[in-house]
Amino acid sequence: MAIAKMSKLNLVAMSYDRDGILNSLQRTGATEIKLHYEAENTRPAEIGCEELRAYLNSLEGVLSRLVAEVAAQNKENKIKSDALDDGFSVTFSEFTSAKNFKAEADEITERAEALFSVRKKTGSELFKLVKTLQTAKIYSYAERPLNEYAGTAHTLIKLGTVPSNVAEGFFAEAENESLISVTQIAAEGEFLLAVVAAHKSAASRAEELLQKFGFSACPFSAEARTGAEYYADLLAKQKSLEEKISATSKALYAFNEKIKPLKTYCDYVRFELEKLQLTEKMRVTQATILMEAYVPDEQKTCVADALDGVTENVYYEFSEPTKEDAPPTLYKNNKVVKNFEAVTNMYSPANYREFDPNAVMAVFYSIFLGFIMADIGYGLIMLLGGGAVYLKTRAKSSGLTRLAGVFAIGGICTVIWGILFNSLFGASVLPFTVMPPLRDEGSMWSLMGINVPAVLIISMLIGIIQLAAGYVCKAVQYWRRGYVWDGIWEGLTWALFCIGAFLAVIGLTKQFNAPVCTTVGGIIAAVGLGLAILTAGRHEKFFGKFTKGFGAAYGVINFASDILSYARLYGLLLSGAVIAQIVTGYAVTGVNGGVGFVMSGNPALIILGYKVK
């Protein structure tokens, strides 16, 4: 469990061998090309990536829409298909031969974009038509051509609708007008279809009447067809548009079998784009390319064989990175610790020349995660759920896979802490309890005569242990760089101080009944702090030696602050435990020595036959 040692690869080759070299290096998966220094008589490689990037974006845009289309149709028709699944494997030769798929991919892209455009346009027409149909439906009862409902030289004639809720008043007022006639043709939904006729002399009065009762004139008055004919034609057009959309969707679904090769081709184009971007890091002359890269030491032979298999016109050498170089960090951890690399990288990946913290971090992260959950039930859920996801997705080795592994491992620690705290979904089910209770009698311990929550003291003790481990890691890091004494004075002396502080806290806590630890811990802490103060200014001159010593003494305050920060573990543990106990209290009630169950409660307690007192 360490960081892989890197070597620097320097290479000079003919320009026409660039693609072959990059392909062979990609196949090894063991090189990271770096920006080449400004060598004399060379210039940066000027290769535009914009055109290829735009091409890739268009391909991926169509691909994503096709995937969504096929997925939607599969869901609608309840079809199960693996065509959309990612993670399928292809050989390297199959991958490189994907370039032959370009013509077909371009044709698929063009046809798919055209079909999507047609369906969008047709869908817009259909949407407008449906709105028109809703309006035209009531006019289907008009048996005469709609354009015949028109006025004459001496009459005003209008065909239209009136809301049903005012129709009675409308007809009543119209009857009181001798020169106005209203005839109802049909009723449909919330409207009535009527014909209004009035003499020209009463036209203004008729208009007032129509406006008063919300009369809406027929919007299809220019149609020479009857209302029924016009409505039937609209229905026929609707059916035609729906059939066109259906045919377009079927044509899009027919690309189902082309999705996997199109995905492979997109990956190939992305690879070509990456090669162009990597080429921009190189330097070139009129006929050659110059490249620098980092290679793990154990992969040097593999990389050398790959380069030799491309061409004889290549010169390369491996060398040690200089202090000015910044090699990439490649972790070498087992399957368990590898899951925690993502957690470390959330903050910052370890520097190439630093100590790999993942193994130490994995231990403490799991312990802390288990401590703040501290429940058998929650731990089993984390273990089973995380384990199931890990086993199902481990072939892809994705971020989700590693996160699931972290939860599964944390679940094991959660179960252990749950046993120690005797907690199953907030209920005490075991005949023993190792850890002190979080509340009630016995939850407080005496630290230097002050009552402090017992679990808070335990949280701080765990924190002191982690701080000590951190200082040991710091010492190891110095030793890796060859600074033996710096590792001792900067790391081990403070680790010694942590051990002394740990023993002192135990000795000062009455319930541990170990007062001798106070003396022993105080001596050890004093020795560690004294050595740290005396050696803090060893690299300084004159007054710097004294000021550095005072700075080391002041570091005790920061140390105390760090220890107190572990009180958060206690806070998270307490809040979770209280919530679990409250929910369990509501969920379970004693009924004749058995169990009563509320739907919001905990089914695990029913199986155990637990009775809350």
Image (tube, rainbow, N blue to C red):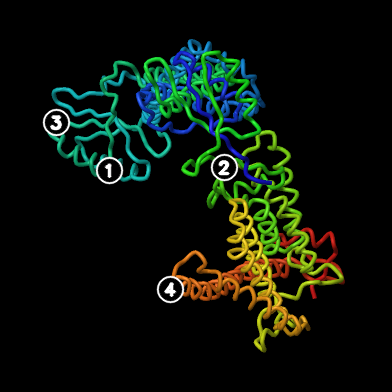
Mark 4–mark 3 Cα distance, whole angstroms, equals 114 Å
**Residue tagged 4:** 543
N-terminal-most mark, 1 or 4: 1
In this view, 107 is above or below 6 = above
Mark 3–mark 2 Cα distance, whole angstroms, equals 93 Å
Q: Which structural element holds mark 2?
A: loop
Mark 1 vs mark 2, foreground winner is 2
Mark 2–mark 4 Cα distance, whole angstroms, equals 39 Å
N-terminal-most mark, 4 or 3: 3
**Residue tagged 2:** 329
**Residue tagged 3:** 200
N-terminal-most mark, 1 or 3: 3
N-terminal-most mark, 3 or 2: 3
Q: Which structural element holds mark 3?
A: helix
Q: Nearer the viewer, residue 140 or 427?
A: 427
Mark 1–mark 2 Cα distance, whole angstroms, equals 80 Å
